[in-house]
Amino acid sequence: MEDKIALITGANKGIGFEIAKGLAERGVTVLAGARSEERGRKAAAEIGVGFLQLDVTEPDSVANAARQVADRYGRLDILVNNAGIAKADGNWNTSELTLATARKVFEVNFFGVISVTNAFLPLVHRAESGRIVNVSSELGSLGTITDPSFPFGDIQPGAYGASKSALNLLTVSYAKELRDTPIKINAVTPGYTATDLNGNQGHRTPAEGARSAIDAALIGDDGPNGAFLSDGEIDFLEGVVVPW
Ligand SMILES: NC(=O)c1ccc[n+]([C@@H]2O[C@H](COP(=O)([O-])OP(=O)(O)OC[C@H]3O[C@@H](n4cnc5c(N)ncnc54)[C@H](OP(=O)(O)O)[C@@H]3O)[C@@H](O)[C@H]2O)c1
């Protein structure tokens, strides 16, 4: 059987780097996407995978990346929308949030996913059983964030959480469109992971944070479509299904 081809956005560091590494270790032909050619090439060389310049907020970069994958492979088996940013203003109070910051966050975490997914979807349709994974967050889960037992209940999700809630609904929307195809699209949460995104405060390692995305990228034909999943090891969540 031919190797699966996977593209991971924001793969030059953090969770994306570990998703790329984990998929490569499982025999997948990985393209590590990164907006910086220098950082991306360095990371791709470290894992021993291909590099693809891809800034999810730049339409030309997205179109160019899709053209390269089309020319080289003619299909894409796995797309992991991992690139993301977390920004706020002042003391992270929602009342201090500026529109400029909110727009920046949505530009990457939400609009970027639409741009990349729609550019690559024709190639995912050409795969035998395409998989799309949207890296979301429990801060985008209305069920979790309003649960009194959620251990990070004092955190204001702000534009970051809102962008992930929007991403979750987008995932469901794509899943509805794709339900009669072999493609499965799911959202995942890595859990609170030590990366640059949170000043390395998270208590999971990036390799642990990558697990849910790797599982969803390799999910079988009998697996879910339009679900919100964890790796089942996040202590405040029960099982692998994350509340919306
Ligand atoms: N860490 C956590 O606790 C946690 C929890 C839940 C969900 N997540 C999600 O996990 C994903 C990965 O985050 P992380 O924690 O690994 O953070 P990270 O270490 O800061 O990595 C973020 C990645 O996204 C890339 N990126 C940012 N803007 C981009 C753009 N416009 N185009 C392409 N790539 C871009 C970054 O590239 P540069 O190096 O060029 O900036 C970097 O490779 C995000 O979607 C995040 O929301 C993280």
Image (cartoon, grey):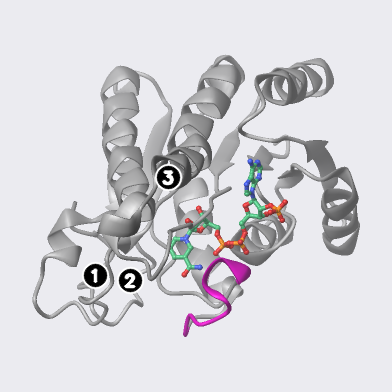
Which amino acid lies under the numbered mark 1 shown in the image of this protein? Answer: Gly
Indicate the secondary structure of the residue bearing disc 1: loop
Residue at (83, 42) in percent of width and height: 51
137 sits left or right of 14 in the view? left
Residue 101 x %, y %: 46, 47
Q: Which residue is mark 3?
A: 220
| Residue 146 appears left or right of 108 | left
Name the kind of residue labelled 2 in the image: Gly
Residue 199 spot, x, y in % from top left? 57, 76
In three-dimensional space, the C-alpha distance between marks 1 and 3, rounded to whole angstroms, equals: 18 Å
Measure the alpha-carbon separation of dots 1 and 2.
Answer: 5 Å
Residue at 34% of width from left, 35% of height from top?
A: 171
The spot of residue 126 in percent (x, y) is 59, 17
Q: Quadrant of residue 153?
A: bottom left
Q: Quadrant of ligand 1?
A: bottom right
Q: State whether the magenta stretch is mostly helix, strand or loop.
A: loop
The residue to which callout 2 is attached is 232
Task: Measure the alpha-carbon separation of dots 2 and 3.
Answer: 17 Å
Q: As shown in the figure, which amino acid type bears the numbered disc 3?
A: Gly
Secondary structure of the residue carrying tag 2 is loop
> What segment is highlighted magenta in the picture?
196-203
Q: Are marks 1 and 2 in contact (CB under 8 Å)?
A: yes
- Marks 2 & 3, CB-CB < 8 Å contact: no
